[in-house]
Each structure stands twice: as structure tokens, then as C-alpha cells.
Image (spheres, helix red, strand yellow):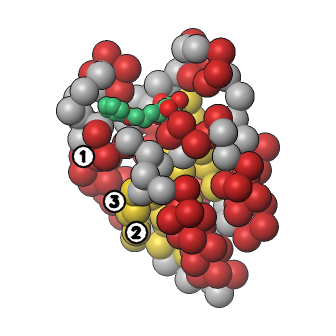
């Protein structure tokens, strides 16, 4: 049984720039943290990052099918800037019924006004915001807690 760790645009740059906003950890560090957290709860992970909206949508579709087949639990998802723009990602999550916990490394509510609205939150099981990369571990715990 596996959990999808899904990251959106520019999160491949983690650890290379803007450490005051996003810390020093790399995306590989995030994925290792997620794998260790999930393993401790009895789950595996599949990690996927894309800078392309359509690729994220395709992954949500394929994982939604795995959940329907009882082969996956759901996803922790940091949609990056698509959080604030993407009706298409909203529709993909809603249309597949994929259980999603939304994660943001930074506290988007303490930043620019355009980051205060999320198209993902209304279709998410829960949201973890502003707790750094530890938020991914908390999101996995929350996903397991809410779905099993
Ligand atoms: O706080 C978060 O996790 C965000 O989802 C990160 C997005 C931002 O657009 C959201 O408003 C909040 C940006 C991810 C870009 O990450 C970078 C990391 C290092 C260097 C440059 C970008």
C-alpha cells in the first residue's frame, strides 16, 4: 500500500535558493523524510515532481485509480504556485476522489495576498502550512489517520 508524495513547480529548486523562505533541505531530503515517515506507519511512497500542470493532473488520475483499486491510500501534495491558480488541479482531485493532504513549507498566509487563496484546499482532506519540510511528515500522519 503506497502514498503519493506529489510536488509541483519549482520545488525541484528546494535547497538551492531562498533558504529564508523554504529552508536548506533539498527535494531529495523531503522525499527521504516522507519515505521514512510512511515506512514507520507501514506504507511505501511514490515520489513525483513536475513543473507541468498536465503531468500533475495525469499523476492524480493514475493514483486515483490505484486508490479505487485498494492499492494506494492517497497523496500529500505541495502544488507550489499552482495552488493559487489551478482550477484544473482542483477538478482533478475532485473528479478522481483522490484523498489529498495539501502541504506548504512556508506560511502562505503571512506572505503576499495572492498566496492567501488556494484552489486545492476546498478539495483537500486537510492542510499543513508553515511548518517547514516537517509539514510533509505531519501530512502523511494526517492522511493515514483520516483514511485508515
Ligand atoms: O510554501 C510552499 O510550500 C509553496 O507551495 C511554495 C511555492 C509557492 O509558490 C507557494 O505560494 C507556497 C513555491 C515553490 C518554489 O520553491 C523554491 C524553492 C527554492 C528556490 C526557489 C523556489
* Secondary structure found at label 1: helix
Numbered label attached to residue 35: 3
**Quarter of the C terminus within the rendering:** bottom right
Q: Which residue is mark 2?
A: 46
Distance Cα–Cα, label 1 vs label 2: 14 Å
Query: In terms of image quarters, where does ligand 1 lie?
Result: top left
Mark 1: is the Cβ under 8 angstroms from ligand 1? no
- Residue under label 1, please give it: 29
The residue sitting at 64% across, 81% down in the picture is 65
Q: Position of residue 110 (x, y in %)?
A: 57, 12
Residue 23 point in image, percent of width and height:
29, 26
Write the residue at 48% across / 56% down: 52
Who comes first in sequence, dot 2 or dot 3?
Answer: 3
Residue ID at (28%, 39%): 13
Quadrant position of residue 136:
top left
For the residues labelled 1 and 2, say whether their Cβ atoms are less than 8 Å apart: no
Amino acid at each position: 500500500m503506497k502514498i503519493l508524495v506529489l510536488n509541483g513547480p519549482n520545488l525541484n529548486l528546494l535547497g538551492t535558493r531562498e533558504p529564508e523562505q523554504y529552508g536548506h533541505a533539498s527535494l531529495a531530503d523531503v522525499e527521504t523524510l516522507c519515505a521514512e515517515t510512511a515506512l514507520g506507519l507501514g506504507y511505501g511512497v511514490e515520489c513525483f515532481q513536475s513543473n507541468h500542470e498536465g503531468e500533475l493532473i495525469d499523476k492524480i488520475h493514475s493514483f486515483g485509480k490505484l486508490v479505487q483499486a485498494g492499492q494506494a491510500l492517497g497523496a500529500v501534495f505541495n502544488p507550489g504556485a499552482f495552488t493559487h491558480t489551478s482550477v484544473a488541479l482542483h477538478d482533478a482531485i475532485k473528479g478522481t476522489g483522490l484523498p489529498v493532504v495539501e502541504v506548504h513549507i512556508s506560511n502562505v498566509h503571512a506572505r503576499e495576498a495572492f498566496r492567501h487563496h488556494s484552489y486545492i484546499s476546498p478539495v483537500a482532506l486537510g492542510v499543513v502550512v508553515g511548518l517547514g519540510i516537517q509539514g510533509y511528515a505531519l501530512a502523511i500522519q494526517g492522511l493515514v489517520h483520516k483514511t485508515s
